[in-house]
Amino acid sequence: MPDEARIKPDSIAGVPSLPPSDKAQHIDTTHQENSVSTHVLKVDTQRNTQSDVFDRLLIREPIYDQNGKTLAVEIRPRISLETKGDDTTLIAALYSLTDQDRHPRHPLLAAIDLASLADQDINYLPPQHIILTIDSPPHPDSRALQLIKARQQAGFRIMLEHRRGTNVPAALAGLVREARLSTHQINVSQLDSMVEQLRHLGMQFLIANHIHCQETQDICSKFRFDGFQGSFSQQYHPGQTRLIEANRLTIMELIDRIIAGNNTDQIEAIIRNDARLCYQMLACVPELPENSPGITSLSQAIQLLRPEGLYNWLTMLLRISTTPSNTSRTHLRRALNRAHLLEALAKKSLNPIPPQTAWLIGLLSVSEALLHHPAQQCMKLLPIADDIKQAITHQRGNGGLLLKLAIATENADQAAIEALAARCLVSLENVHLSMVNAVVLSESVSF
């Protein structure tokens, strides 16, 4: 900010100072033509504005209501710098995005710590466009409460970040009436308890954060959250989701096996027979690193979820699932038939493809029919390898060739079967034998 416009901290009324923070204080929001400085970088912008620089530094994630309307947009660093300077970047970005009477279409939300709430640069922000979220201090002193109250009186919306195992002090609950809950790695009972606690404290506006699968979103909708945030919420809002059709006896059996400490092979043997269960489980896998090649088998997904994650997912699924319809059972059986067929063909083919990967391609290839959404949209939410997605959505690669061959057998297209068998480097005899075995195996499973 221009030096001549900067106000001395001790001249701002109503904002008490907290103990000095060790965060870097190097924000420079001046409009220079050739450079722009923050606490982390000095970038030659020449043709770029300061907003362009912040767009590359920050992620923008919308927060939606029940009907898919955008309530606010969170901005946060793309990479946590671990220098305790992230808040200064956020505050500078908020200034850049609202400077010169800019009016963002939706309120901008930024998560900062309590010490940063006292940052004098916040005084330059337009409060009507800003939501600031802070972690609830376990024992807030009078200065912290006075600071929060002063920011609210200035027009800023203050929201608490609430996580499992934390309590909101009564004094703080009397001031702040909005909270955001992390749904990461919690089960339905824990989530229910957290919501009940916050509502009892008088919270009037609750946002569910880290929603990565339909189970979590549907449960949060039942618990009457006001806002929804996460990768799944960006794809669908509650009114767009379909009922999850799954055999409840199967879900309870899986829960019992997890509680009993059964190994992952026994759990995989149950899940691998149900395409819908398989899809739902993959959607619940924690986000993988950006450079990860993606999941290529069910066993890999189960190991990533671990028993606690499986249990949390299954308890939510048990609460919201319904019995499969006759149409869904038909699709489930077709998916299982394809999985058996592709696995057998992968073992016989001279083209290199792991059998467990071929199984996954076959099982997920009916997702569009099961979920009533385009295949590309269905696959976008899954952390599976790109070659699996390409095989399912565009029938590319060795997996895509095997899937084409499976579809040809379903259509009894003999000419296509012969041509594709040759391309897959598998004999017609093996194709016919695998096809018969796949039908027998898939018909022996009940849904």
Image (cartoon, rainbow, N blue to C red):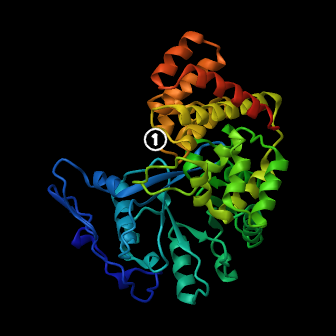
Q: Nearer the viewer, residue 245 or 167?
A: 245
Which quadrant does the N terminus fall into?
bottom left
Q: Quadrant of residue 290?
A: bottom left
425 above or below 154? above
Q: Left of 209 or right of it: where is 261? A: right
Q: Residue furthest top?
A: 415
Q: Secondary structure at mark 1?
A: helix
Q: Residue at x 48, y 75 (%)?
A: 113
Across and down, in percent, residue 234 comes to: 55, 45
Q: Is residue 66 visible?
A: no
Q: Residues within 10 Å of mark 1 (few under 14, many from 20)?
A: some
Q: Nearer the viewer, residue 195 or 127?
A: 195
Q: Residue at x 55, y 45 (%)?
A: 382
Across and down, in percent, residue 162 comes to: 62, 70
Q: Amino acid at mark 1?
A: Asp
217 above or below 78? above
Q: Quadrant of residue 21?
A: bottom left
Q: Is residue 3 visible?
A: yes
Across and down, in percent, residue 115 comes to: 45, 80
Q: Residue at x 47, y 71 (%)?
A: 112
Q: Left of 60 or right of it: where is 64? A: right
Q: Nearer the viewer, residue 59 or 403?
A: 403
How many badges with numbers are in the image?
A: 1
Which quadrant does the C terminus fall into?
top right
Residue carrying label 1: 386
Across and down, in percent, residue 139 comes to: 61, 87
Q: Left of 106 or right of it: where is 363? A: right
Q: Nearer the viewer, residue 123 or 18?
A: 18
386 above or below 251? above
